[in-house]
Image (spheres, rainbow, N blue to C red):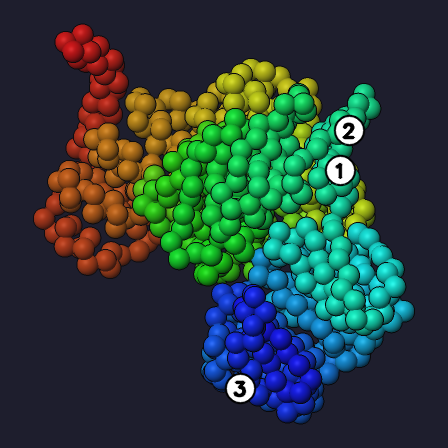
Amino acid sequence: MFVLTSSDGKFHLISKFGRVEKTVEAHSGAVIAGRWNYEGTALLTVGEDGYIKMWSKSGMLRSTVAQTGSPVYSVAWGPDSEKILYPLGKQLIIKPLQPNSKVIQWKAHDGVILNVDWNSVNDRILSAGEDCKYKVWDSYGLPLYSSAPHEYPITAVSWAPDGELFAVGSFHTLRLCDKTGWSYSLEKPNTGSIFNIAWSVDGTQMAGACGNGQVIFAHVVEQHWEWKNFEVTLVKRRAMQVRNVTNDAVDLLEFRDRVIKASLNYGHLVVSTSLQCYVFSTKNWNTPLIFDLREGTVTLILQSERHFLLMDGGSLFLYSYEGRLISTPKVSGMRIDNLNSQTVSLSNDTIAIKDKGDEKFIYLFDALSGKPLGDGKPLTHKMEILQIALDQSGHANERKLVFVDKNRDLYISPARRFGKEQRAIKIGSMVYTLAWNDVSNMLCGLQDNRFTVWYYPNVAYVDQNLLAKTIFEKDGSEYSKTPQIVSFVGNRVTIRRSDGSLVHTNISPYPAILQDYVTSSKWDDAVRLCRFVKEESLWSCLAAMAVASKEMTTAEVAYAAIGEIDKVQYINLIKDLPSKESRLAHIQLLSGNFQEAEASLLQAGLVYQAIQLNIDSYNWERALDLAVKHKTHVDTVLAYRQKYLDNFRKKETNKRFLQYAEGIEVDWEKIKAKIEMELSKERERTVSGPTVRSSISSQA
């Protein structure tokens, strides 16, 4: 059904066949606007009498939401249908429907506000006023864009359903704008004022209610996609033009139905029409792969190197580029239709989805099976998350996810947990836009008005002291106030400025080459490259990559090159350790993973080494716990503890240490002999280990 509001204070509920089902006396004076919530279960009406009322689907009054002293010209539901937005004179007001909740109110325009809209996908607000301006706001009332004054008051604003575009109506004026505010096109139809704009569900066309009694229809055309040397333009509703800029070859792609969505990346163009999906290879534009869609209302296409994700009719479908359905990830109780490219991310093996219901949660799925990763519990952050992105290269077990929270802090987290405690590490602050590289694990972003490239973000899990040394920064003031990173392909970053113009910036190709060498285990070539380039950032990346791969010879060379002498000495100590398990534990210790280092030693049966690890780190209580639990080296712990206290001329006050010291006499000669015995046992085990293993395998 639909609702029709009228100037006599009534609204009419009308079926799709045109039959009036019910007429309701709603307001005194005209009912200026009526809005259904996103579920279609509740209706808001606003009137000249200043009342805002909520009604059930059948037309029963549920509540009077607000009572103002002047006419309310427009109203909009919040994305979760739990808040409403309405103008009052020059003010905008966000009112939660729960009682005793905080109301947000701010001065938005210099004239009366005539129209508002709030998008459920990007969570942004539009407002239009008699001051002849339209403005874009976030859901906290912070200004994101303000237009230049127009000739006449702005009478209509409306978001496209996917939140990528919005339309603006004024006297003899229809304007199409990007979500950030800049204008794609301006039409001057002879319509009078355009009072209301409605979009089709697929976001390809719009209708406007005009002051001269006519309805104006418009179609979105000339959308543009670029990837490497190809550019694709939607020239008609059912036709695309492909141009190869290297040889100026032009191909025309024609479709049976109108084009709704398209994406060009990783050597493939994916196009969805109202009924079918077309997959073109950039190597051959003549023979696309075509398959039928389930619903035909695709609102999002995401691509990775091996497959692509379609959001079609409230469900997610993962397809290979051969058109085979791989998986359909599902999250129970989550609305899928309001997701966008900032809240869903795809890599070759993982899908990440931010929960719109509770914005502190990120759900992670295995791409090939569509099942939740690990125990199925979401990754949880302490604050609302705004944007997520998965890295695109490397092994599935090393997949990393970055996210920006409400404070604009940038965090990195492992996507696959393997029973370990999930640990997100902060690697940036005041980050407004970001993108992963398409083929290597480099990350670029704009943080605090500086263009920043993290050459090796995984360094946060290897050696946090190197993080600052593996970052490239330059001044970002040339990109204007609120730029957006469009793509990061090869060593070229494309940034869209707030006026809509595209700016390209190139970064050093060497970090990507270094990552290729490391991935292929060409360590000598990696060292040779660093010696040729002679940059501290590259040596720092190599040091972290070598430690992550447990390639200690290369790590020693790299740390020496950046003057980290303490690390070089520690690596030499690691090399001299007798057993593989001890070396592994100390490498983990070098990366700051103390608990994992201890667990490795205990798992290998090297109890003394685990105790000594805690003694060296002054974790006295843990050292004593291990000694008591395994009934060994209690005297060693007490001896080192006593020596430590003597050095500082202190007396023992810890009750547990006093209790165990009563019955044990500390004899340094005996302790040294025991330690030597433990070390010789470890050496013997290392020598005899391969023999034992080979004899077992021969028996098998």
**Dot 3, how many residues are within 10 Å of its Cα: few (below 14), some (14-19), or many (20+)?**
few
Discs 3, 2 touching: Cβ within 8 Å? no
**Residue 241 position within the rendered picture, expressed as x and y whole percent measured from the top left:** 76, 33
Going by the numbered disc 3, the residue's amino acid type is: Thr
Please give the residue where the numbered disc 3 appears in the rendered image: 64
**Residue 645 position within the rendered picture, expressed as x and y whole percent measured from the top left:** 30, 51
Q: Nearer the viewer, residue 258 or 448?
A: 258
Q: CA distance from mark 1 to mark 2?
A: 9 Å
**Dot 2, how many residues are within 10 Å of its Cα: few (below 14), some (14-19), or many (20+)?**
some
Discs 1, 2 touching: Cβ within 8 Å? yes
Which mark sits nearer the N-terminus, 3 or 2? Answer: 3
Placement of 347 over or under 693, stated as above or below: below
Mark 2: secondary structure = strand
Please give the residue where the numbered disc 2 appears in the rendered image: 243
> Residue, x 45% and y 33% (percent of image)?
325
Which mark sits nearer the N-terminus, 1 or 2? Answer: 1
Placement of 243 over or under 482, stated as above or below: above
Discs 3, 1 touching: Cβ within 8 Å? no
Q: CA distance from mark 3 to mark 2?
A: 57 Å
Q: Is residue 423 visible?
A: no
Going by the numbered disc 1, the residue's amino acid type is: Thr
Residue at the outermost left position: 663
Going by the numbered disc 2, the residue's amino acid type is: Arg
Please give the residue where the numbered disc 1 appears in the rendered image: 233
- Asked whether, in this view, residue 18 is left or right of residue 673, the answer is right
Q: Nearer the viewer, residue 304 or 654?
A: 304
- Asked whether, in this view, residue 664 is left or right of residue 32, the answer is left
> Which disc, if any, is residue 455?
none
